[in-house]
Image (spheres, rainbow, N blue to C red):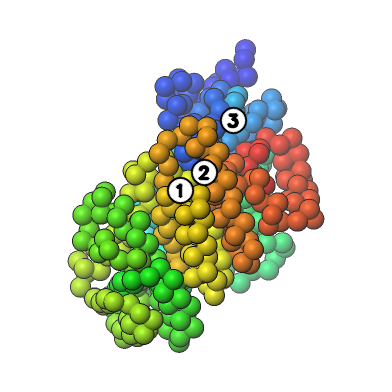
Amino acid sequence: MSAIDELTGELPAGVLVTDPDVMEGYRRDKAALVPAGTPAALARPVSTEQVSVIMRWAARHGVTVVPRGAGTGLAGGANAIDGCVIVCLERMTAIREIDAVDQVAVAEAGVINADLERAVRGQGMFYPPDPGSFEISTIGGNVATNAGGMRCVKYGVTRDSVLGLEIVLADGRVLRTGARSLKNVAGLDLTSLFIGSEGTLGIVTAATVKLRPLPATPPAVFVASFPALSAAGQVVTMIMAASVRPSMLELIDNATINAIEDYRRMDLDRNAAALIVGQADGSDALKDAERIATICEQAGADYVACTRDPDEADGLIAARRLAGTALLEAGPTVIEDIGVPRSRLAEMLGEIERIAREAKVRIATVGHAGDGNLHPTLVLDDTEPTTRDHALAVAEAICLAAISRGGTVTGEHGIGMLKRGWLASQLDGTAIDVHDRIKAALDPRGLLNPGRGW
């Protein structure tokens, strides 16, 4: 009996798939230039116990396992490795609990972010993390990359909303971390250790997350158009220095504006150098939005508007959310994910423009400006080797520019395979050694997602 036949016999019918045509749809994520191998099998478990069975089997036979959510990643972190078993959590979709008193929910790894949001809204709460892919990305994937999103300027990233995790370790044991209480310092902070670990230390099967009460009044949305990209970058620092905190503060440059309009008419100004789109919530939402609009006018905006009209507000936010999809439709892309201190944002935007001009590469930049997280997106003509190599060199130059300004090579997408070579410019040898030691302690045979993360 082969090892795959043995695993087939240990799992219910339909969980393990070896049909090449089916597996093809699970071989890679959205990172266009990152290679993907050929898996030996695809597992789609429906319970933590089934994930545990798979990992115990993998440990016996020394088989590499690649965890996967919805495949919306942008760094190749879920790409197949030759001979591996892909463990896709897409069928683990139960919201096990919503507790309105303690304001927590327990969601399995395959729950779509937006589905959790809709479920808790019915009980007067919301789940803060909202990555651009929130309608298709999963809670497990969000945890694996410590995803952020548009609301993180006020409410933080995934780590700030997770109280505890259920994780299957490399040897098949199930680890439960954290507590439901808001304060908990019992033992090491194992929850934070696994958040952002990209499936290299264990497979997250469920998360206990913090919820927040919905604001009593509707949010207010504001938009400002700028004739110069540098002015849009500078106004972010001015807004964040004021005594007002938006719940969203997003930047869209001219190339992205036009990509959105080419993809779907949203009535954005195609001639604007940049748009700042944001939202304020709470009891003073409209007042705060109007204060921000005034700051934008003082910084040189040639058009500003505030609205509480639901249709107008939804349209502006929807336009921002379309940016990623529109750019992916524009052609092969390398979607970068750098972060810099807000005080260096305008400078970084100028550096991206310089790099694009000198490298003769089209770069469209969009980002969560309120926390200095930018997504410069290289739009390519093709994926030929010379084009690919040039694009990766440009992407590396952008990452190094961010590091030199006190920033990071990734704010929320993760390292995956794409950025492993650039990480040494940010983390020194001691930091990498500590990573290696933690990996060796939890996964001594290197079975879980090897070659990703660092």
Rendered image: mark on residue 391: 2
In the rendered structure, the answer to whether residue 335 lies left or right of residue 316 reads right
Determine the secondary structure under disc 3. Answer: loop
User: Which mark's residue is nearer the viewer, 3 or 2?
Assistant: 2
Q: In the rendered image of this protein, does residue 218 appear above or below residue 356?
A: below
| Location of residue 70 (image quadrant) | top left
Mark 1 and 2 residues: CB-CB less than 8 Å, in contact?
yes
Q: What kind of residue is marked 2?
A: Ala
Q: Residue at x 51, y 49 (%)?
A: 359
Q: Amino acid at mark 3?
A: Ile
Q: Which residue is mark 3?
A: 81
Label 1 sits on a secondary structure element that is: loop
| Alpha carbon distance from label 3 to label 2 | 23 Å
| Residue 191 position within the rendered picture, expressed as x and y whole percent measured from the top left | 62, 58
Tag 3 near tag 2, CB within 8 Å: no
Residue in the image at 71% along x and 37% along y: 446
Residue holding disc 1: 361
Label 1 or label 2, whichever lies nearer to me, is 1
Q: Is residue 318 left or right of residue 389?
A: left
Q: Which quarter of the figure has residue 19?
A: top left
Please name whichever residue, 154 or 339, is drawn nearer the observer in this view of the structure: 339
- In front: mark 3 or mark 1? 1
